[in-house]
Amino acid sequence: MRLSFAKMTGAGNDFVMLDNRDGVLSIDRDSIARLCDRHFGIGADGLMLVEAGGDGGAEFVMRYFNADGGEAEMCGNGARCFARFARMLEGEPGAPVAFQTRAGLVRAEFDGELVTVDLTPPQGLRIKGWIQTRHGGSFELHDCNTGVPHAVVFVEDADKAMVSELGREIRFHPNYQPAGTNVNFVQILGPDAIRVRTYERGVEDETLACGTGVAASAIVAHLARGVALPVRVRVQGGDELQVSFQSDGESVTGVRLKGPAALVFTGEIEV
């Protein structure tokens, strides 16, 4: 089977985009993993299908798969890329769009190269828990599900964070089984700024950016460390994202993620 695809990036988080509005495309887990392989495929952190319809006024359905081929509920950077790609397919590049994800309805709007998405309300918010690990001993850890589960660890210097080693251990820690968790290492840069490095579940390595991780890190940084809103977030790929929301000091609503989403190239590939 020959597939037409687009390759997109959101702050360095890259994706294979496939148009499945007619509903005829069937692709299995192994094929997704091959397409995302950086040596023998297109290369990406994940793959998305654009499908038609949805509930609650959605024009499209976003199906997101991690690089290992497993389907996930949501991806923040992916949602921005999805919105731009869906509008490119429709020939309406600047029109707001609503689409359904497994985590709920997402709305997006455009400002030049920047895309803002309204994320679903965070769940499972836990500030100041503790975890015991082999690599880091016992330390403070926070949890926030922004469509997918995230653990947040504060570090003095993000450059020295053991992202691969400690991130993998926390991702597979018994506390987070059976689904596991993504792990974010957060450095406070200033009154309204943080830096985030993320170990992503499903990719099983550090990625250059993670939108839901950026949102979870900003929420935790505001509630646990008093970082001012909106929170500016620098990611490993070098871009800066912005997270805004409303909070009464305990609960959080109206989470919005703003950042770049760009087309890298288009092509065809045999599957």
Image: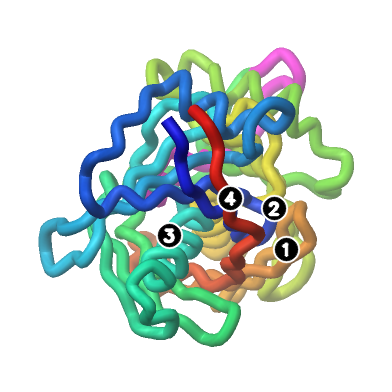
- Marked residue nearer the N-terminal end (3 or 2): 3
* Residue depicted at 63% across the width and 43% down the height: 184
Residue interval drawn in magenta: 133-150
**Mark closer to the observer (4, 2):** 4
* Residue depicted at 53% across the width and 57% down the height: 77
Q: Is residue 134 magenta?
A: yes
Residue 140 appears in view: no
Amino acid at dot 2: Val
**Mark closer to the observer (3, 4):** 4
**Residue under circle 3?**
82
**Mark closer to the observer (4, 1):** 4
Name the chief secondary structure element in magenta: strand
Q: Is residue 239 magenta?
A: no
**Which mark identifies residue 261?**
none
Label 3 Cα crowd, 10 Å radius (few <14 / some 14-19 / many 20+):
many
**Residue under circle 1?**
234
- Marked residue nearer the N-terminal end (4 or 1): 1
Front-most of residues 263 and 109: 263
**Which mark identifies residue 196?**
2
Callout 4 touching callout 1 (CB < 8 Å):
no
Residue 207 appears in view: yes
Percent from the top left, x then y, of residue 20? 30, 48
- Left/right of residue 206 with respect to residue 176 in the rendered view: right
The residues tagged by marks 3 and 1 sit, at their Cα atoms, a distance apart of: 22 Å
Which element is circle 4 on?
Answer: strand
Label 1 Cα crowd, 10 Å radius (few <14 / some 14-19 / many 20+):
many
The residues tagged by marks 4 and 1 sit, at their Cα atoms, a distance apart of: 31 Å
